[in-house]
Amino acid sequence: MFEKLDKIVEKFENLTNMLSQPEIISDQQKYKELSKERANLEPIVESYLKYKKIFNDIKGNREILNSKGENELKELALAELEELEPKLAQAEEELKFLLLPKDPNDSKDCIVEIRAGTGGEEAALFAADLFRMYTRYAEKKGWKYEIIDMNDTGIGGFKEVIFELSGPEVYGMMKYESGVHRVQRVPTTEANGRIHTSATSVAVLPEADEVEIDINPNDLRIDVFRAGGHGGQNVNKVETAIRITHLPTNIVVTCQDERSQLKNKMKAMKVLRSRLYEIELEKQNKSITEQRRSMVRSGDRSDKIRTYNFPQNRLTDHRIGLTLYNLTEILDGNLDEVIEKLKIADRAEKLKESSEVL
């Protein structure tokens, strides 16, 4: 591990020197690429330098203890050792985590698809609650969101809503939301006060670049139609809505949010590309998943990942056994605590898996 770290420090220093060279500064694209590479290495280098300082401090204090010096000085050295040794172990764990291969998709924007499942209208209303939760969370994080398609029920619920989230590390934060979200509450239409259980599925897809997914135009069937409003009303007198069918996979994507046919087609292609990219990722990860299935990172939409219990104001994430009693705040977009605990659990699992390698 330390040989690898020394090479990283050397590379970091080389990049720092290169960024000060006039020919690099004048080439904006090259400067941007090298700056990004240096920025990715910087946390590792800083953590390693911190580790080395603690290590050298421990070494110095041990030398004092083994010397023939004064007892008072030895007592100080012993006290420092007791404080430094746990810090060294912590710094080593941090280094191990930083050396783990990063998910290349974490820095990408993402497509979020929310679909009402079992529970009829109540499930559709909960889909709307989740949409509000995620968009409020996006606002708090300074992300942008854009609706791609929605199928509302006319009374405040969504049978389906698809939207894009863009910003720093969006997919890296949102990927933990994929799965089935279960709600337990008394519907407004329930006269006897009985608690009903409904479910809504969430899929979070990393946005794929055109370079990553090559789509053959001959594999597509594109239909245009008039966009419909609430209750079947026409919101457009011209055919601006788009339905794209990918014939090899039979994936169908619809977009009617924009008044421009071209914009709707671009949005629909973006969703199609992300869905095809997800299929490719699943193929790549299948062999790994069969060996070690991560509860935290599972994107299987059949997994019941979370329960929202309204009478108890409780949220339970079943993957990590997390229970919180601030459901109202969470539904208002305060998701940081939940996602942070999922990231910590994910981190612990990754460290456990990599311990033999490192």
Image (cartoon, rainbow, N blue to C red):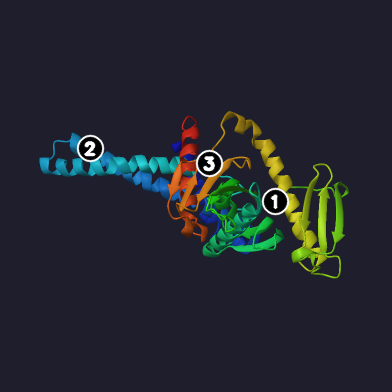
Q: Is residue 349 above or below residue 199?
A: above
Q: Residue furthest right?
A: 218
Secondary structure, mark 3, is: loop
Verify CB contact (< 8 Å) between mark 3 and mark 2.
no
**Distance CA(mark 2)–CA(mark 1):** 56 Å
Local crowd at mark 1 within 10 Å, few (<14), some, or many (≥20)? many
Query: In this view of the protein, can residue 200 be seen by the observer?
Result: yes
Residue 49 located left or right of residue 126:
left
Going by the numbered disc 2, the residue's amino acid type is: Glu
Q: What SS does tag 1 mark?
A: loop
Amino acid type assigned to the residue bearing label 3 in the image: Val
Most extreme residue toward the front, as rendered? Answer: 192
Residue 163 place in picture, x, y as percent: 67, 58
Q: Position of residue 191 (x, y in %)?
A: 56, 56
Residue depth check, mark 1 versus mark 3: number of the one nearer the observer: 3
Q: Residues within 10 Å of mark 3 (few under 14, many from 20)?
A: many
- Give the mark nearer the N terminus: 2 vs 1: 2
333 shown above or below 196? below
Q: Is residue 89 left or right of residue 144?
A: left
Residue 293 drawn at (x, y percent): 57, 34
Foreground residue, 11 or 235?
235
- Left-right relation of 39 to 32: left
**Callout 2: few (<14), some (14-19), or many (20+) C-alpha neighbours within 10 Å?**
some
The disc at residue 208 is 1
Residue 288 image position (x, y, % from top left): 61, 32
Q: Which residue is mark 2?
A: 63
Residue shown at the point (47%, 59%) measured from the top left: 329
Q: Nearer the viewer, mark 2 or mark 1?
A: 1
On screen, residue 128 versus residue 98, left or right, reads: right
The image quarter containing residue 102 is: top right
Q: Which residue is mark 3?
A: 296
